[in-house]
């Protein structure tokens, strides 16, 4: 059965690369999508099929694109309750609870945020890369709670992806996290600039690395509060300048202050729990995850250009641990 499609036709406004000319003429379709269509042979210039996005077109050249309708999403739609901070026809901001996986993968084919969004958004999703699916532009670890923005269409996905690729250095994007770490960092505020790559000792972990494949990673942190008398832990605000896998968890462990509850990067600090009061130890045990919460998210709306800002208070399990640590007194 043939896939329904539509014919897009335009004249090149000026001399340019083919993919750029198409993206400029049809802003609702991303340049990446046009590059894929060109490679598939769905684009012609002056009646001749072209398969190279860098092909030069002249002003006035006739460009034609066969644009298939978006295919159904591959993950199954699964209705589940979502904490929605904001939603419009282009994007949705979710306050993700700890324990929810963002994207389907090995061992998590169902029950993910993507499954839930396909069910929630329904026909409001348009083709992202040719598939009706939510556009994930950043992720949170399964056991990290907090704010996450997701695109509903190709144009919004392209605009948000561009902001996340710039890592906030152009002033459009801001992401900050609350983290509870063991001990007190030597400096009350600082910048951790340490490249990250997959660990050579354990491929399930990330690690600070100077290897050829390591990627730049920069985390800004500030100590908001020391916890306990004498201090056994600290509450930090961390601002990401880059967005690497497990970045805050790896960086805080790197400077000797891993996150409470982090069994992957803070396992060497399990004995520190002996310094906690009974109430604080019980709250940490109940947390059963790393003490990390994506509390603030700001970005430029990819369609309207309006600056958007969202805040998420610490969830109950995080707040309970924080309160118990404030009262914590080291046992003699």
Image (cartoon, helix red, strand yellow):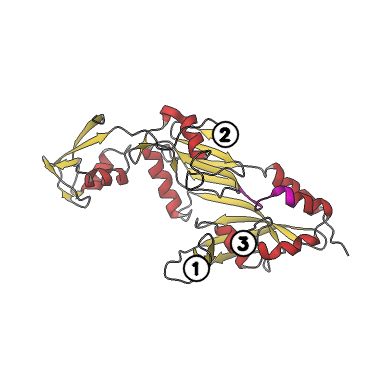
Q: Outermost residue, right direction?
A: 332
SS category of the residue bearing label 1: loop
Residue at screen point 19% across, 43% down: 41
Determine whether 48 is above or below 120 in the image: below
Residue at screen point 55% across, 45% down: 297
Magenta region, residue range: 284-294
Say whether residue 188 is visible. no
SS category of the residue bearing label 3: loop
Q: Is residue 227 left or right of residue 150?
A: right
Mark 1 → mark 3, Cα distance in angstroms: 15 Å
**Residue that badge 1 annotates:** 200
Residue 72 is situated, as x and y percent measured from the top left of the image, at: 37, 33
Displayed quadrant of residue 48 = top left
**Residue that badge 3 annotates:** 265
Report if residue 289 lies within the magenta region.
Answer: yes
SS category of the residue bearing label 2: loop
């Amino acid at each position: 059965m043939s896939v329904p499609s539509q014919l897009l036709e335009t004249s090149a406004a000026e001399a340019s690369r083919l993919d750029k000319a198409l993206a400029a003429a049809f802003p609702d379709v991303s340049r990446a999508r046009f590059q894929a269509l060109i490679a598939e042979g769905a684009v012609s210039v002056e009646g001749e099929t072209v398969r190279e996005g860098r092909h030069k077109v002249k002003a006035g050249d006739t460009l034609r694109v066969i644009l298939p309708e978006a295919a159904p999403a591959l993950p199954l739609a699964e209705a589940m309750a979502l904490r929605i901070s904001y939603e419009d026809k282009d994007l949705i901001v979710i306050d993700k609870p700890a324990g929810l996986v963002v994207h389907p993968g090995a061992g998590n084919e169902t029950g993910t945020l993507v499954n839930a969004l396909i069910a929630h958004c329904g026909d409001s999703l348009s083709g992202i890369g040719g598939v009706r699916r939510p556009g994930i532009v950043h992720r949170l670890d399964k056991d990290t709670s907090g704010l996450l923005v997701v695109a509903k269409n190709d144009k919004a996905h392209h605009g948000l992806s561009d902001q996340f690729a710039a890592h906030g250095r152009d002033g459009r994007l801001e992401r900050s996290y609350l983290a509870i770490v063991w001990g007190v960092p030597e400096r009350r505020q600082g910048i951790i600039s340490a490249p990250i790559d997959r660990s050579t000792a354990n491929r399930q972990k990330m690690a600070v690395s100077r290897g050829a494949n390591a990627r730049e990673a920069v985390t800004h942190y500030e100590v908001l509060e020391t916890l306990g008398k004498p201090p056994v832990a600290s509450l930090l605000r961390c601002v990401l300048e880059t967005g690497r896998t497990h970045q805050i968890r790896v960086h805080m462990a790197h400077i000797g202050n891993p996150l409470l509850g982090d069994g992957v990067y803070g396992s060497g600090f399990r004995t520190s729990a002996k310094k906690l009061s009974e109430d604080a130890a019980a709250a940490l045990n109940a947390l059963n995850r790393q003490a990390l919460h994506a509390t603030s998210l700001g970005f430029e709306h990819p369609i309207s250009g309006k600056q958007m800002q969202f805040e998420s208070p610490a969830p109950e399990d995080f707040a309970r641990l924080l309160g118990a640590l404030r009262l914590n007194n080291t046992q003699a």
